[in-house]
Image (cartoon, rainbow, N blue to C red):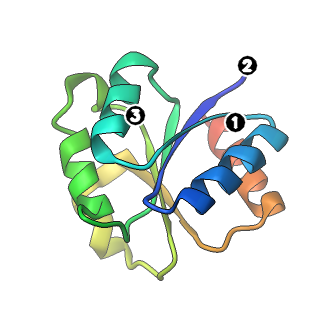
Amino acid sequence: MTYKVLVMDDDRVTLEMMDLILQKIGYEPCTSYTIPDALEIIRNDRPDLILLDLQMTPVDGWGFLDALFREKPAVDIPVMLFTARYLLPEEYARYGSRVVGVLEKPVSLPELKTVLDGFFEGR
């Protein structure tokens, strides 16, 4: 089974790179640059996991999470935070088990593959 991973980031270069990397390691990528587009993807082509950048503008990743969990079909989609800064667990604790992990940028291809394979094997 090929798992679909939605990457939400406001940096188009990062999205293009993640699209290529995810394909290379055997996942089906979909990418979004904006919150409305991401929510539309989620409504129409539900991903198995969301990789979410936190430091975006005009709305940051926390704002996206809040919008995401107001969407009925999206409530149980797992989210892995994908950020350039270290996060303390207290910073995302309010989202409970919806946030399944944190990847710090930059992430290498082998690291991403190991993390994603481990996540999906555990489901």
Q: Earlier in the sequence, mark 2 or mark 1?
A: 2
Q: Which residue is mark 1?
A: 121
Q: Which amino acid type is marked by label 1?
A: Glu
Say if 14 sits above or below 65 in the image.
below
Q: Is residue 94 left or right of residue 122?
A: left
Q: Is residue 85 above or below residue 1?
A: below
Q: Which image quarter holds the N terminus? A: top right
> Which residue is rendered at x = 77% and y = 51% of the image?
113
Residue at 65 percent across and 51 percent down: it is 16
Residue 115 percent coordinates (x, y): 69, 54
Q: Is residue 90 above or below residue 82?
A: below
Left/right of residue 35 with respect to residue 19 in the rendered view: left
Sequence-wise first label, 3 or 1: 3
Q: Which residue position is annotated with label 2?
A: 1
In the image, 117 versus 52, the foreground residue is 52
Residue under label 3: 77
Residue flagged by tag 2: what amino acid is it?
Met
Q: CA distance from mark 2 to mark 3?
A: 17 Å
Q: Are marks 2 and 1 in contact (CB under 8 Å)?
A: no
